[in-house]
Amino acid sequence: MALRRKEMPEEIQQLKRQVQLLESILFSFVRSDRFDMSKNIQMQDGRNFQFATGVGSKIGTATGQKLGFFNAVPVVQQTAITGVDNSTVDNTYGQQENDVITNTRTRVNEIETRLENLGLIAAN
């Protein structure tokens, strides 16, 4: 029985050290406004990021932060696309060609707007 009593204080001290270690680890997560990851994050198949629908969330909080998708080299936010050409199509073309050119311009402008709204390119 005497041997057991001598072992108990050491076991208690070891448990106290383990609890302190766990508290320090938890403290870094619970009391912080962010998680600081020093390793890659790997998602299992079928898992998703879910966001609230109020104010919204950002991936990247500055235009100088680099992102890459589908194994592309990460880059900063791309510059704005050259100014929109809103000139009218001249009479050199027939109505069908004129309609195709106008439709193409409209669609390119819509794509540019959507890329700007996503923040993938700078606004013009």
Image: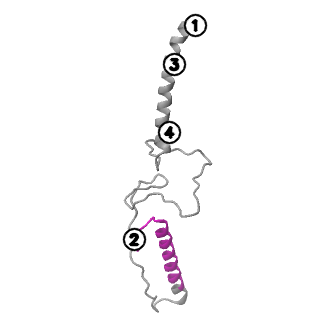
Q: Nearer the viewer, residue 100 or 40?
A: 40
Query: Residue 19 placed where, x, y %?
Result: 50, 30
The answer to whether residue 2 is left or right of residue 120 is right
Q: Earlier in the sequence, mark 1 or mark 3?
A: 1
- Which residue corresponds to the image point at 40% horizontal and 62% vertical from the top-left? 77
Pick the front one: 70 or 48: 48
The mark that comes first in sequence, 3 or 2, is 3
Labels 4 and 3 touching (C-beta < 8 A):
no
Q: Nearer the viewer, mark 2 or mark 1?
A: 1
Residue 38 spot, x, y in % from top left: 43, 42
First in sequence: mark 4 or mark 3? Answer: 3
Q: What span is colored magenta in the figure?
A: 99-124
**Tag 3: amino acid:** Glu
Residue occupied by mark 3: 11
Task: Locate residue 86: give its quadrant.
Answer: bottom left
- Looking at the rendered structure, the kind of residue marked 1 is Met
Q: CA distance from mark 1 to mark 4?
A: 37 Å
Rendered image: mark on residue 80: 2
Between disc 4 and disc 2, the foreground one is 4
